[in-house]
Every structure is written in structure tokens, then in C-alpha cells.
Image (cartoon, grey):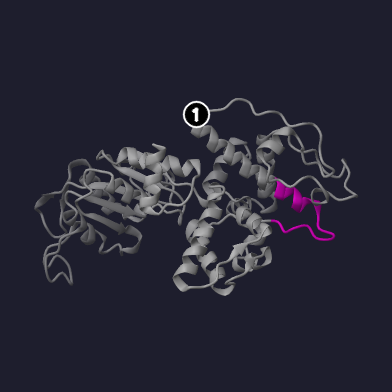
Amino acid sequence: MEEEITKVKQRFSIIGNAPALNEAIERAVKVAPTDLSVLVTGPSGVGKESFPKIIHQYGARKHRKYIAVNCGAIPEGTIDSELFGHEKGSFTGAVAARKGYFEEADGGTIFLDEVAELPLTTQARLLRVLESGEFLKVGSSDVQKTDVRIVAATNVDLRKAVEKGKFREDLYYRLSTIGIEVPPLSERGDDLFLLARKFASDFSGKYMTAPISFSEDARRLLRLYSWPGNIRQLKNVVEQLALFEAGSEISRHTLMEALPSVASEAAPPVRQQGASYESERQLLWQMLLSLRQEVENLRRRLGGYGELPAPSSATSAGGAPEGRMTRALAPWIPEPGPIFGSPSATVEETPPPPTSLEDAEREAVAAALVRNRGQKSKAAAELGISLRTLYRKINEYGLNE
């Protein structure tokens, strides 16, 4: 399967080796030979559109039509006509009969992107297609049959949409027979550097400009920034730098100027004279959160893990643990030194560090919520995690009480 995953990445130009990404590709390849409906989920900009193509090309329908439909880009008044077709004179402007996508794609695959944007009336029509393969053209009473494979995608939590009455529960279960979750860029570790290098190289080759590189400080910022726009945002930023900074090594300062203002919130600045200890402490918590995610991904990949080795009781001057676990699992955390504390810091002035990754994560989430006065979207951006993950952590640690 690893060899097959590698071939899929090469064929569909997918960059990265994150376990969660490989798991998503593996699920797509395994479900492709069946006719089961698939729901692809993940934040905007993570590359969800590649997975329906994988499913189509690795399935029995690969020689038939593949049609991608952006449900959010079609006006509500014409979406039924676009999907199911219409008869002549069925509405103003219908000067001739027209086939819809479900009729055109008979025998093939339809990809419904942003499926959560479908009106409830259209959802009812779609459910009928999924259950019986039948549909009605707009303005017609003749039932037609179609045989299509449906793959849907959304960046919306459909379970919450069901609870709010914005999405049909029966349709949700029909669409999500098989679920594929595409991880956000902030949870893909070093894939970020591979993607940045690829985008820079492609731009340089296409426009014959001198290549750019990233300094160590800039690489740290790349890793710490939350990337709310995910791969799409990274590509735009890198191409902007490749154009205006051609031939240069990109510094942290230059990268900061290319990022939205939220960058200064997502990644605390390098310590300057008189800077507070709290900012460096939050930097450490973000590193611990990243480590925690990598450990969880590894656990899912290997099927579980035992107890983590306990950190040593020795601490740096600023209170950061220097245990064997921290050094072994997080070599990217700088060696303790002045950056993690100040000569005047005392034990009484700062609380002791958490004794486990769970404690560190809980304190980081709680602190972010306090700093942002309970505004969860801002807290999630600061922590570099999705809003959905933040809600899960709040419930997990009982922070909503």
C-alpha cells in the first residue's frame, strides 16, 4: 500500500508524507472500486478536490464522465435546473430543454463540492437520486433514471448543520457512507516545507526568476503560523515572495510582512530586550501542542501506544522541562537559555510547568481563551488549530464550565 500511495501522489501531484494525509489517500484508493458514497471533509484550501479524482480514476467508472460541481457557486434559483435539467418553458428563460449534470454523467462520477450549500429542497431531490437513482427534470413529471457515483466535499461540520436544521439528517448519512478527512496544513508537520519549496521552484521555473530560500527563523515562523487558508494561502504567499524577493534568502521579517496581521498573534516574536517571559512561554506551549498532534498521528498510524516516558524534574531557568522526553521527541525546541527566562525570574513569579503533554495542552487552551476573552475563533487562530478542534478540546478538558 505504501508503494501504491506513492504512485497516487505522483499521478495527482500531491506533496507530503504526513501520516494523516497518507491515511486519507489510502482510504480513497480502497473505496474507489466500490460504488459507495464518499464524504470528503476538511478546512478550505487543503486540497479536497484531489480525492474525488483519485476515487474516480481508481474505480470501475474511470472511462466514463467525471463532473465536478461547485454547489456554492450556483444561485439557489437555478441549482435544480443545473443538477437535474429542465424542460422547455418550465421557467422564464427556458427556451429549450436541457440536460442536467446527473443525466450527463450517467455511468460516471459526480463530485459535489461545498455540498452543505445546497438548499433543503435540492437536498430532497439529491436524496432520491442516492436512494433509487431517480430524478425529475424541472417542469417535467416523467421520472428518469441515472447511475452515478456521488462524492461530496465540505468544510462545514454537517452534524452541526443537521442539528441547526440546515442539512437533512437522512442525506447526511447517505452521503457519509465512507468518510475521508483531509488534514489542515498546520497538522502536517514538515510537509509545509516541502510544499513551500515546490511552489517556489515552480514559480522560478515558470517565470525564469532566481530561486528563493528561507532562513532558519523564517522556517520557524512558517511552522508556527496557523495557516487559516491552508495550502492555497501558502501557495499565494510563496509566489508573492518568489516574485518580489527573487534570488533572496527570506528572513523572518520579510515573511512577516507577507503574512496577514494575524501572524503576529499566531507566532510570538523573537525575544527582544525587555520582552516579557509570558510570550516565550506561549511559544513553548505552541511547540508542545504541535508535538502532541504528531504523537497522536503516530498513535493512529501504529494503532496505539503505551505510556510516554515522564519528563525529568530538572528545569531550565525559565521553568521549561529539560527531561529526556522533551529532548528526544522535540529536538526542534531550542536548548534552554535566556530566551526562556529572564535573570530576574523566580519560582514565585511563574507557575511550575505542566507535568504532562495533556497538562500543557489544557493550560495552553485555557490561557488562549482567557487572553481572547472567550472568543473561540481568535483563540483557535492563536493556537494554530481549527475551530472544531478547539471545541473538542474545550469539552475534553471541561473548560466550558
Is residue 276 on the magenta stretch?
yes
Q: Locate residue 36, reporting x and y percent.
A: 27, 39
> Horizontally, is 33 left or right of 231 in the view?
left
Q: Which image quadrant is residue 253 in?
A: bottom right
Total numbered badges shown on the rendered structure:
1
Q: Position of residue 170 (x, y in %)?
A: 30, 41
Q: Where residue 163 sits in the image (x, y, percent)?
A: 42, 44
Vertical placement of 105 versus 29: above or below?
below
Q: Quarter of the image for the C terminus: give it.
A: top right
Q: Decide which of 112, 208 is in the foreground and name it.
A: 208
Direction from residue 294 to residue 158 in the image, left or right: left
* Quarter of the view holding residue 215: bottom right
Classify 183 as above or below 73: above
Q: Going 23% across and 44% down the picture, which residue do you hit?
A: 130
| Residue 221 appears left or right of 104 | right
Q: Which amino acid does label 1 sit on?
A: Gly
Q: Which of 396 and 163 is in front in this view?
A: 396
Query: Which quadrant does the N terminus fall into?
Result: top left
Which residue sits furthest top? 306
Percent of width and height locating residue 167: 35, 48
Residue 157 falls within the magenta-colored stretch: no
Circle 1 Cα neighbour tier, 10 Å, few/some/many (<14 / 14–19 / ≥20): few
Q: Which residue in the protein does label 1 denote?
A: 303
Q: Nearer the viewer, residue 66 or 197?
A: 197
Q: Which stretch did the figure color magenta? A: 268-284
At x 24%, y 40%, the residue is 35
| SS at badge 1 | loop
